[in-house]
Image (spheres, rainbow, N blue to C red):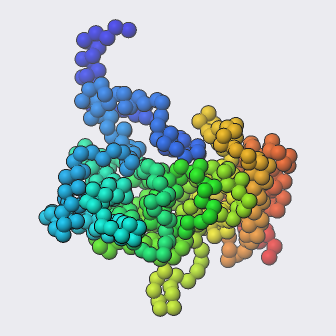
């Protein structure tokens, strides 16, 4: 077809409202949602089909019209290269750090977030100076200090978010962003230990994260927040305690990234209490007070999330360990489960140990490749949930992990051990559900259980019928609805004898 000047001028004469309506037909599910059940990697962020991005390159008018659709599902990369203007920061730039090393500080406007940024940088500097002195007995140079601070993630959290929010404000996108995924790069495990540790020198990472989410939610109000990060980065980005470094860490080197996906149901959406209000950064409760645990200003606590999805990738290398199942990976799932465990929240001195987040949680999805049954004891979650969704083997999709057919990634693992452990998870879950008694005072919330591994289990090496694993303990209460899906049928306490 030949595009004449007349045809070009015709489409240019369309009202922007009509153009926007046309572009909505090009909109599609974001890659981070579409790939959520695939083994976590940076591939989660990308799509081979990008009609809206291509349309935004046609003209300035089209870009202005398309921009709200483009940023409906936004992405914030904290692992991107630092732009040159960050070097001019009066807090964490090289000149500022050099001045600090000489005992002087550059003046800067006394904005609350900037003051908080300086406090966290000073804590990080004190940590690095202490580490250098203890290791070498020398004073850290300003060049080393600058490199350590840049590596620490402090500038990325502060400046990355500030730059992103300036762009959002300049393009009037505050009310358009419905979903946001935050991405960090890999952090070598030799640099940062997991929380908790024997000292609190690393609390600056948790301070940075608390300030990051408070600042973000005072400006934006997304109904979905996702985090794609290495396991240890996930701990400080969620202000969770995930466990001390253990002897089995080597077994989880295949876990480059974990995914945490938080959502609000459409029917329960209410504006964020932080939206449009100044943040009192000095009062942020940024550190978990027990292990496992969640801090008061964790992103898990700041909104009444109704759905949580966790994707922890492959456990496969750990099956070559002689101590199978004794050491799990660094994971936020223990802190999430602990937050729902009924227990006293005060010490003998009436000091509050932990907040009680997640009161609105109704759906929990867990995705991994052959996780250990010890990681998946859901007894603390079941009383609160309405739906539990599990996928414990590689996804059966064109973009799924090829781990089972890759000899290098499989190594010398006996897959029979993997299938046995997967079956143990479902047997354990079935037993827990069977013990969930229905009485007049205790009618469980749980209405639906989804086991997405039934297609695998029907041809697994154990040769057992998967229904024999899941159904017999409670056939009358949990009828089989469709492949892998079970729904609670009897909700009346009088049907089930005491």
Evaluate whether residue 426 shows in this view. Answer: no
**Image quarter (top left, top right, bottom left or bottom right) of the N terminus:** top left
* Residue 328 percent across, percent down from the top left: 63, 62
**Image quarter (top left, top right, bottom left or bottom right) of the C terminus:** bottom right
When asked about the image quadrant of residue 62, the answer is top left
Task: Answer above or below: position of 162 versus 351.
Answer: above
* Residue 250 percent across, percent down from the top left: 60, 56
Q: Nearer the viewer, residue 382 or 335?
A: 335
Give the residue at the far top of this rendering: 2
* Residue 351 percent across, percent down from the top left: 45, 86
Q: Residue at x 53, y 49 (%)?
A: 256
Query: For this view, does 492 lie left or right of residue 351?
Result: right
Q: Nearer the viewer, residue 411 or 425?
A: 411
Q: Residue at x 59, y 74 (%)?
A: 341
Task: Answer above or below: position of 282 versus 234.
Answer: below
Evaluate whether residue 368 shows in this view. Answer: yes
* Residue 480 percent across, percent down from the top left: 77, 51
**Numbered label tally:** 0
Give the residue at the far front of this rendering: 137
When asked about the image quadrant of residue 408, the answer is top right
Task: Answer above or below: position of 487 versus 122.
Answer: above
Q: Residue at x 62, y 33 (%)?
A: 398
Q: Residue at x 76, y 70 (%)?
A: 435
């Amino acid at each position: 077809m030949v595009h004449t000047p007349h045809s070009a001028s015709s489409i240019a004469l369309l009202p922007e409202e009509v153009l926007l309506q046309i572009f909505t037909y090009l909109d599609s599910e974001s890659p981070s949602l579409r790939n959520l059940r695939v083994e976590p990697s940076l591939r989660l962020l990308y799509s081979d089909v990008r009609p809206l991005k291509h349309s935004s390159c046609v003209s300035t008018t089209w870009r202005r019209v398309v921009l709200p659709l483009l940023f409906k599902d936004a992405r914030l990369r904290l692992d991107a290269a630092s732009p040159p203007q960050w070097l001019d920061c009066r807090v964490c730039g090289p000149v500022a750090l050099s001045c600090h090393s000489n005992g002087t500080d550059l003046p800067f406007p006394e904005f609350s977030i900037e003051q908080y940024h300086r406090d966290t940088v000073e804590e990080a500097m004190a940590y690095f100076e202490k580490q250098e002195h203890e290791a070498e007995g020398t004073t850290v140079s300003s060049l080393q200090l600058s490199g350590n601070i840049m590596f620490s993630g402090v500038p990325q959290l502060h400046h990355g978010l500030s730059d992103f929010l300036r762009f959002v404000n300049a393009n009037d996108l505050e009310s358009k962003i419905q979903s946001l995924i935050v991405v960090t790069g890999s952090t070598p495990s030799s640099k940062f230990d997991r929380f908790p540790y024997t000292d609190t020198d690393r609390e600056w990472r948790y301070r940075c994260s608390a300030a990051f989410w408070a600042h973000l939610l005072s400006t934006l109000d997304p109904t979905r927040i996702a985090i794609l990060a290495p396991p240890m980065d996930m701990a400080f980005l969620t202000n969770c305690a995930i466990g001390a470094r253990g002897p089995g860490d080597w077994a989880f080197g295949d876990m480059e990234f974990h995914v945490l996906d938080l959502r609000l149901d459409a029917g329960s959406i209410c504006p964020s209490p932080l939206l449009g209000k100044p943040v009192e950064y000095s009062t942020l409760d940024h550190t978990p007070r027990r292990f496992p645990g969640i801090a008061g200003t964790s992103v898990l606590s700041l909104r009444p999330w109704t759905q949580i999805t966790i994707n922890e990738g492959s456990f496969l290398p750990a099956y070559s360990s002689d101590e199978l199942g004794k050491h799990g990976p660094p994971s936020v799932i223990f802190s999430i489960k602990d937050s729902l465990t009924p227990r006293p929240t005060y010490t003998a001195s009436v000091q509050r140990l932990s907040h009680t987040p997640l009161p609105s949680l109704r759906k929990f999805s867990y995705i991994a490749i052959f996780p250990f049954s010890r990681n998946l004891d859901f007894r603390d979650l079941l009383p609160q949930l309405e739906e539990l969704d599990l996928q414990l083997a590689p996804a059966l999709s064109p973009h799924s992990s090829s781990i089972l057919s890759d000899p290098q990634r499989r190594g010398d693992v006996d897959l029979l051990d993997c299938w046995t452990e997967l079956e143990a998870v479902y047997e354990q879950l079935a037993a827990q559900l069977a013990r969930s008694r229905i009485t007049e005072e205790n009618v469980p919330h749980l209405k639906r259980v989804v086991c997405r591994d039934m297609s695998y289990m029907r041809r697994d090496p154990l040769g057992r019928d998967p229904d024999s694993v899941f159904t017999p303990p409670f056939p009358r209460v949990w009828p089989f609805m469709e492949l892998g899906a079970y729904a609670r049928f009897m909700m009346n306490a009088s049907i089930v004898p005491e």
